[in-house]
Amino acid sequence: AQSVTQLDSHVSVSEGTPVLLRCNYSSSYSPSLFWYVQHPNKGLQLLLKYTSAATLVKGINGFEAEFKKSETSFHLTKPSAHMSDAAEYFCVVRNYNNNDMRFGAGTRLTVKP
Amino acid sequence: DTAVSQTPKYLVTQMGNDKSIKCEQNLGHDTMYWYKQDSKKFLKIMFSYNNKELIINETVPNRFSPKSPDKAHLNLHINSLELGDSAVYFCASSGRGGAFEKLFFGSGTQLSVL
């Protein structure tokens, strides 16, 4: 079965500094991986996705993620945090056979002025 | 046009009551889901239907019963509501291939059981 583990429940950075949100996956197949963001009291929004094309995936709002098969990782990064990035971030893995989409436990990103 | 719409947005009810949440998608997707988000923001899949057929049924109390009258609708009925059912419930849909390989979420239903 597919699963993802988000290694940090909470990450705090200063505005203007880099962001790193870590995600490791477990999958029997070549996975499809996603990052979603949820701002306070809002629904979920897709940031980016990996579906076996380029291993470095660029998303919205300056975020990107790199698929590393050798490390079974799909970490989310951004060079410079903005106050508006404060939100909950979810790493998701998809089972191609039945479209099962499994969420990680989430990482809360706090951005300090 | 809202892609995935769920109603109601807020639901406040007493313990022991029965309630339903409705979900509709106009994206032509084959797969629909119900997720539960608890107070710690953990999103957990409850059910998934593909073309009206149940394909994922996680360890959810049988008080929860999904119903899919057609592939554009997936409703969630909850019997004998309990305090622990209080959460935000999200409906979602997904297609296959290219731009459709992602989840489209409804705006959520905040259920409060008193």
Image (cartoon, coloured by chain):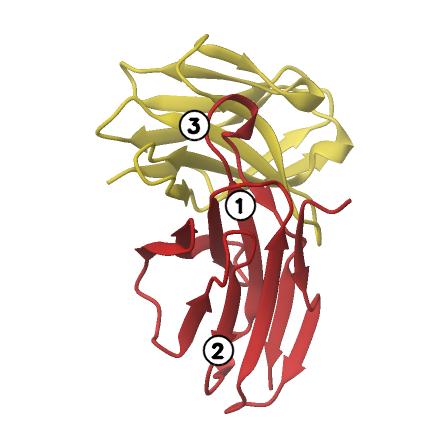
Chain colours: A yellow, B red
Which numbered circle lies on residue B64?
none
Is disc 2 surrounded by few (<14), some (14 to 19) or many (20+) residues within 10 Å? some
Say if labels 2 and 3 share a chain.
no
Q: Judge left or right: residue A100 versus residue A64.
A: left
Q: Judge left or right: residue B38 versus residue A13.
A: left
Q: Position of residue B6 (x, y in %)?
A: 65, 60
Amino acid on which disc 3 is placed = Leu
Q: Position of residue A77 (x, y in %)?
A: 56, 20
Amino acid on which disc 2 is placed = Ile
Residue closer to the observer: A51 or A81 = A51
**For the residue labelled by badge 3, is the local secondary structure a helix, a strand or a loop?**
strand
Which numbered circle lies on residue B78?
2
CA–CA distance between discs 3 and 1?
16 Å
Q: Which residue is mark 3?
A: A33
Identity of the residue drawn at 62% across and 77% down: B112
Is disc 3 surrounded by few (<14), some (14 to 19) or many (20+) residues within 10 Å? many
